[in-house]
Amino acid sequence: MNNINEYLKEERNKEWRVELRKSMKAKERTDKMRVHMPEADPMIRNKNSEEVNKGLVLQNAVSEAARCLDCAKPTCIDGCPVGINIPKFVKQIEAKDFNGAASTLKETNALPAVCGRVCPQEIQCEATCFYTVSLKKDPVAIGHLERFAADYERNNGNTSVPVVDKPNGIKIAIVGSGPAGLACASDMAKWGYEVTVFEALHEFGGVLKYGIPEFRLPNEIVDVEIDVMKKMGVKFRKNIIIGKTLTFDDLREQGFKAFFVGSGAGNPSFMNIPGENYNNIFSSNEYLTRVNLMNAANDAFDTPVISGKNVAVIGGGNTAMDSVRTAKRLGADRAMIIYRRSVEEMPARVEEIKHAIEEGIEIMTLHNPVEYFADEKGRVNKMKVQKMELGEPDSSGRRRPIPIENSEFDIEVDTVIVSVGVSPNPLIPSVLPDLNISRWGTIEVNPETMQSSVEDLFAGGDIVRGGATVILAMGDGRLAADGMHKYVSEKVKIN
Amino acid sequence: MADLTTKYLGLTLRNPIIIASSGLTDSFEKITELERNGAGAVVLKSLFEEQIILEAEHNLKEAGRNRLIYAEFSETLDYIDVHIRDKELGKYLDIIKQVKKELTIPLIASVNCVSDIGWTGFAKQIEKAGADALELNIFIMPFGFDNNCDEIEQKYYKILRKVKQEINIPVAVKISPYFANLGKVILNLESEGANGVVLFNRFTSPDIDIENINVTIAEVLSSPFEMTNSLRWVAILANRLKIDIAATTGIHDGKAVIKQILAGASVVQVASSLYINGISHITEMLKYIESWMDKKGYNYIDQFKGKLSQEKHSHPDVYERLQFMRYFSKLK
């Protein structure tokens, strides 16, 4: 910790930072209003896959960066799961060294353009910003600035490739190309390891590709970040299911010295209520994967999804918002969220809820489905919902939903998307009998090193957490890389 | 040699001793042991809604303590109670499937209902998994003093009606004795389609520890003297109902089983006596019944079932409360 603090202090005391701080009075900085992210017109964007947030223009980014006070004790960094040197990159933007800002981001974050778009900064770095904590003002728009720097670099053809150490010839396997796996792969590659990422699907990026729609995170952004890793020497192999196509023993025989498992939580959960097996009732995993990854919105493809006219999405998280907004874009007249608590308890980002409402999504709070009905062909045509009220808070501090008796009524629906959570992919735990698994089906790891009970296997992301944000998964990947690096270094010394 | 075979809910049981829904019946291994020790049937441990809420609370607390379990904004955590219920139901159905695949003992599933929402769908899955019958353990705690008796009773009928619409296997209803007109409620349950009634549910009750000035839980296991209430109502209802009666609470030995059958019960349900004496106590109870039947010259259960029911008894008023008052008034 002292080393980090010393490093931050040293960076902050560099001449250009000192000069920049002096160039504007603190009062002038704090008097500035937070910049607004420009957005596509809601009534147009809800009919296409255009990205909703348009990104900051250069002048606005510089102006927003000038709000940052370049604090001596930058509390914003405490809120970042991957420990980005936030003041440094923000000040680089103020100094118009945009490529430098992007390089700073890449020192600790393999996917800055992704995180700038999908991280819940409002509960992370921006929640611990001096403006939020002490001034009670809107925080510096760190997320918007992160995206700006990453986009600027990419759009100007200056995409930098992080420096990698001399190859050490030690082979590392990463299982899963989602955010946890990519973060781990990036760090290991920087340290000179020979890294191979194995992906079960036909596209790389994991949940970034199959789970997050284009209008929130264009696939192209993910591809560019993966290309950077390829340039760093990371090998990517798709359509390989570790545990089936290749076993861990096969990989050990091929010379891999350690493994990082970031196979995610791809098992969708349902509510187990009557009628849930009728046609056109999907999990959000299936619905989004089919649309995002399998071109299901395109009639020319083999497995289209029905473009429902009355679509109900069950749940109040980001995945539910992604699903309902996707349904709207596929042509739904009525696309609604059905959530058993109130808006205040929704796990979705405030921004996502706001965007959904702007796009004409109905938010039906304090309602819960209790039964589905179908036509003679087994296609869902109606759902029974029950009204709820909020009772006493549970252990999470949120008020518990309680059904109101005799309050049920029917709603006509032709598509239902259930978005109430996921559980870890069971394949890898099932093929490794020595792997300790929690009662939730997640892989148990040492929280300091992310090492599992199988000594050469490290894990992180949803397979460990049962459901996490992109940035938390990336934090796990980085921590695991650190643990793996120490483990392999020890092993190599011994052998 | 006496034949103990009996019928309950249309099922043929090798004897009238059913192991009540309890910790004794919560796994395939335990049910295997019960079958080996001669049980006539088992009622699988109930799934309690309360239990699921407690488990969800535990998970939420764990998530607060351990940063590696569920992110704050996880949709899984948001619906954790639903997932726990789902997981518990899955385990429950697995036990049913395994018992039906590997054992021959009749298996009655049990659901603890407090509402007609959600659980009726589960009944369908229980039937699909292969349960021979379903016991609905209904108790609606009348905490809300605004509800009148009829409203509460209607909930019982509504749950039963809905379950009967969903499934074809026989359904028994286990109730408490706490109704203003118990007999009428039971008759109504019969007309709503119940195939049997289980008399009565016994609840965990509070007690007070006067040393530590604290509220505690009263004795969990029943005592033999607690049998009298169910004995009275079995006798009163035996010939008024066409459906089966299972007697439970306080049945601790073979003698008690015989008493309940004489009063009119088709079967009895036991649990506390096995907790106290061990599972081999089933064999002891069966031996006692056999030797009593031999001694009395009965070859079949039906020969003495209901022989002392209120209707058949020469002094039917012996089962009525007034007679008890007269009896007590004579005591000096």
Image (cartoon, grey):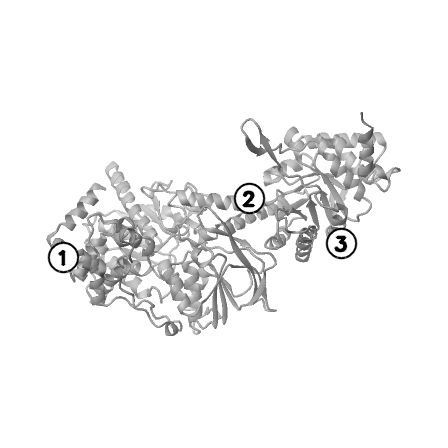
Looking at the rendering, in which quadrant would you find the N terminus of chain B?
top right
Residue type at tag 3: Ser
Question: Do the residues bearing badges 1 and 2 touch, measured as CB atoms within 8 Å?
Answer: no
Residues beneath discs 1 and 2 located on the same chain: no
In which quadrant of the rendered view does residue A241 lie? bottom left
Residues beneath discs 2 and 3 located on the same chain: yes
Residue type at tag 1: Leu
Q: CA distance from mark 1 to mark 2?
A: 60 Å
Secondary structure at numbered mark 3: helix
Which residue is tagged 3? B191
Q: Is residue B251 visible?
A: no
A222 lies above or below A495: below
Q: List x then y, in percent, for residue A360.
A: 43, 70
Q: CA distance from mark 1 to mark 3?
A: 86 Å
Disc number placed over residue A20 in the picture, else none: 1
Which residue is tagged 2? B51
